[in-house]
Image (tube, grey):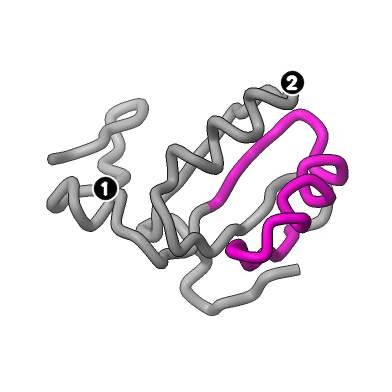
Amino acid sequence: MAIIDAGRLLYQGPVEDLIAKDHWIRLKVDRVEDAFKLLSRDPRLFLSRNGDQSLYVKVEEEIPRVNALLVQHGFRVTGLAGPAWLPRDGAFA
């Protein structure tokens, strides 16, 4: 599978790697602070924040569960990126 945005290759590889369990994902939501508080209540999730721009979530279960939880609580999820897009230097702010 390949994901292309504006002519740029963002990801190429198996779907399984993109949605694999126990990976960090980057979430962009309309209210980062509130989303951080909501997701922090779930002991199965590990979180990090990148200021007020995005959240990094390490999930041990399927990624769609995290997305559904946010949507059910009225958040607008504007971005959800798999491990291919995480900072390679591991710099989480």
* Viewer-side residue, 12 vs 32: 32
Instruction: Report if residue 4 lies within the magenta region.
Output: no
Q: Residue visible at 65% across and 24% down?
A: 72
Badge 1 is on which residue? 11
Q: Position of residue 89 (x, y in %)?
A: 53, 78
Measure the C-alpha gap from mark 1 to mark 2: 29 Å
Q: Secondary structure at mark 1?
A: strand
* Viewer-side residue, 61 vs 87: 61
**Which range of residues does the magenta coloring cover?**
26-50
Q: Residue visible at 27% across and 33% down?
A: 4
Q: Residue visible at 42% across and 56% down?
A: 61
The quarter of the rendered structure image containing the N terminus is: top left
Q: Please tell me how crowded label 2 is: few (under 14), some (14-19), or many (20+) other residues with Cα within 10 Å.
A: few
The quarter of the rendered structure image containing the C terminus is: bottom right
Instruction: Report if residue 48 lies within the magenta region.
Output: yes
Badge 2 is on which residue? 74
Relative placement, left or right, of 9 versus 52 is: left
The quadrant where residue 84 appears: bottom left
Q: Position of residue 27 (x, y in %)?
A: 59, 44
Q: Position of residue 33 (x, y in %)?
A: 86, 46
The quadrant where residue 79 appears: top right
Q: Please tell me how crowded label 1 is: few (under 14), some (14-19), or many (20+) other residues with Cα within 10 Å.
A: some
Task: Say whether disc 1 or disc 2 marks the residue closer to the N-terminus.
Answer: 1
Q: Position of residue 88 (x, y in %)?
A: 47, 73
Q: What's the amino acid at mark 2? A: Gly
Q: Disc number at residue 48?
A: none
Query: 64 above or below 22?
Result: above
Q: Residue visible at 26% across and 48% down?
A: 11
Q: What's the amino acid at mark 1? A: Tyr
Query: 93 above or below 1?
Result: below
